[in-house]
Image: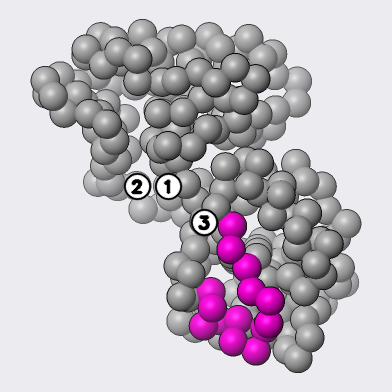
Amino acid sequence: MARIFVVEDDTAIRNEVIEVLERQGFEVSYCLTFERAVEDILLARPDLVLLDLTLPGTDGQLICRELRQQSDLPIIVLTSRVTEVDEVMSMTMGADDFIPKPYSARVLVARIQALLRRIQGAGDAGRVIEHNGLSLDLSRSLATSTETGASVELTKNEMRILSLLMSHAGAIVSREAIMRDLWDSDAFVDDNTLTVNINRLRATLERIGVTGYLSTHRGRGYSV
């Protein structure tokens, strides 16, 4: 489960963002004061920071610069300061993306997921995820039963679905989130297409003796 740290002083917006992210299976933390925001972020050890620019007692761009000096955490600026100068300065200070307010919840989640995928992809070489009797080699798209040692190569879609679910092990990942991860959008995608892909993944895992690994939660999504 990816962890997002939100730096936002507007209570209504912060609560709305937290609700949007938690519905997508993210774990969210935040700060209420901002003088020690960088220390709070580093202490929380998030996977990504969502940062407003206009903050009491400080400026988001300064937080961005200081954070970038100490960490390579992905940073997305979410702000009502939408001039070209603000965007350029934010990127110069080390932000990875810039989203203006008012924002679309769907776009926000898609941009977060896309950035996390890019970061994950950069570090996937040689990385292996293990959960509940199954090992997934991300660099070789290879699933292996840790009980029998049997392995099977996954298709691109099987790999992306399984790696997403295993990265969120224990949590329910919505069908919409999986479709966005597969096709970068849940618009214009037949819902049955995902069902077909899930069933193919189940059949592939059964070839190495891994049965019942994916759980269906009717109306909510899937989990491992």
**152 left or right, relative to 178:** left
Q: Which residue is under mark 1?
A: 121
Label 3 to label 2, Cα distance in Å? 18 Å
Residue 122, image x, y percentages: 41, 52
Residue 75, x across and y down, in percent: 60, 66
Distance of label 3 from label 1 (alpha carbons): 17 Å
Say if mark 1 contacts mark 2, CB within 8 Å. Answer: yes
The answer to whether residue 211 is above or below residue 107 is: above
Q: Is residue 133 left or right of residue 179?
A: left
- Cα–Cα gap, marks 1 and 2: 5 Å
Local SS, label 1: helix
User: Residue, x 31% and y 30% (percent of image)?
Assistant: 141
Q: Mark 3 points at which residue?
A: 3
Name the amino acid, label 1.
Answer: Gly
Above or below: residue 149 compared with residue 107: above
132 or 105: nearer the eye? 132
Q: Is residue 42 above or below residue 47?
A: below
> Could you classify mark 2 by the number of other residues whose Cα lies within 10 Å: few (under 14), some (14-19), or many (20 or more)?
some
Pointer 2 residue: 124
Q: Does the magenta stretch include residue 38?
A: yes
Q: Which quarter of the picture shows residue 154?
A: top left
How far from the left and from the top, in percent, is residue 137? 27, 36
